[in-house]
Image (cartoon, rainbow, N blue to C red):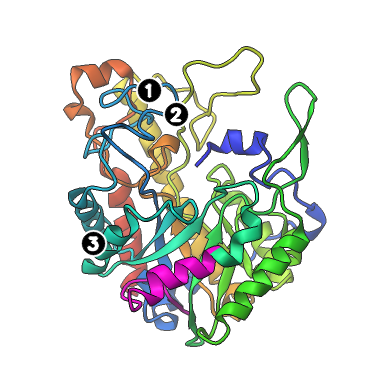
Amino acid sequence: MVTAGAALAAGRSEAGWIDQRVVPRRPIVDPPAERALADRFTDLRRHFIFEYYPWYRTNPYRHWNEADRQPPIDIASNYVPRLGAYDSRSAAVMEQHARWIADAGAGAINVSWWGPGSDVDVIPTLMDVMRAHDIHVSFHIEPYADDRALHYARDIQHLITEYGDRRHWDCFLLVRHADGKVGPVFKSFGTILVPLFDDCHGKVVHVPNYAADAVWAEQTAQVRKLLAADFDRVTLLADSLDLPRVTAGGFDGIAIYDNNVRPDEWAPFAHGCTARDLVFSFNCNPGFDGVALRHVDPGACYTPPRFQPGDATYDWSRQSQRETAAAASLARIDESFRTTVALQTARGSANVRRGFFLTYLNSFNEWHEGHQFEPMKNASTLSADERAIGYHDPDDGAYRMNALTKLLSGVLAR
């Protein structure tokens, strides 16, 4: 996943190109409504879904060595995983991940998927392990090729056949809506893009994976035709805030990935979705702390990512500063969780009207962007070499997962 700053610069996130006329500035939050969730959704834990990345490798290293890093000590993350620089293909790693996810109370993962052929070496074992822990699996369709929009229906058919039909639906996520209808949910990243943008030098740049709304509309219609006989409902979500184009593309709604879109900005978009009868999902997240490149070409349009939430600059060598940053992340987890639940359950919202509720937890293990809930090492357990690199690990490396577990237990127990 590219960093949010890079995504914006490349035209891969749509937050900067919103038609404000369809986003009225008034909230639709109704805080007491979350009490009804457990009554409306008998499988409520399945509606809380961790974004999950199976792309880490060792021998040779992959992904840990991005951004000019040299693992295993020097890795492409501002935090050191409690498991170290692991291999996603390891069944032992998957087992530990599944235990953490199940213990937190979530009932599903949304696996980053990069097209046919990218999944054969890890997904089957991953699903076996998740099934053993009663965790279901959905798929986050990534922009794996410039023409991937043309293959959207084919890709969904592949996922349904390979990991639903052939596994006898043992753990493929089928969401049960409030009206009792059941069906899959597919989320896609980098979906509604602008065709051109101006870079930092004023040069007009073509966005290579841009697809016109008519292309998406044809593909979403084809998906529904392919799956109409098998499911009561199919929900297709675009990672976009351009609501007119989401509608034109034939999507059911939006699911926003970018953690730099703050919770206090969500309500107008939720209201805009309701006005268009689009469902919406905003994620629960600890903010953003992306790893920076060490070597940048002169003249490149690159700005190092900043820690979010807030605009503070931290001295990461100081324990007190790391704890201050952790407190900011804790506040973001709490705010984002409560806000998305309140918006989705507000009386009169499109979600309530259509019996939809889904919260993505961003993320379980996107270490490059620093918004992982997967436990990191406690600061006291970092080696001298790791401390010299300047990692951001706080005293309690499990603080994010512990906070989320408490929030989930409060909702699931109602």
* Circle 1 residues within 10 Å: few <14, some 14–19, many ≥20: some
* Residue at numbered disc 2: 291
Q: Are marks 1 and 3 in contact (CB under 8 Å)?
A: no
For the question of whether residue 349 can be seen, the reply is no
The answer for how far apart the CA atoms under marks 2 and 3 are is: 30 Å
Observer-side mark, 2 or 1, equals: 1
Amino acid type assigned to the residue bearing label 2 in the image: Val
* Circle 2 residues within 10 Å: few <14, some 14–19, many ≥20: many
Q: Quadrant of residue 100?
A: bottom left
Lower position in the chain sequence, tag 2 or tag 1: 1
Q: Are marks 2 and 1 in contact (CB under 8 Å)?
A: yes
Residue 258: percent from the left, percent from the top?
Answer: 55, 46
| Rendered position, 196 above or below 231 | above
Q: In percent of the image, x 56 and y 42: which residue is there?
A: 260
Q: Quadrant of residue 205?
A: top right
State the SS at label 3: helix
93 or 337, which lies in front?
93
State the SS at label 2: loop
Residue 229: percent from the left, percent from the top?
Answer: 55, 87
Give the left or right position of residue 212, taking residue 155 as reference. right
* Residue at numbered disc 1: 69
243 or 195, which lies in front?
195
Give the left or right position of residue 43, taking residue 277 as reference. left
The answer for how far apart the CA atoms under marks 1 and 3 are is: 30 Å
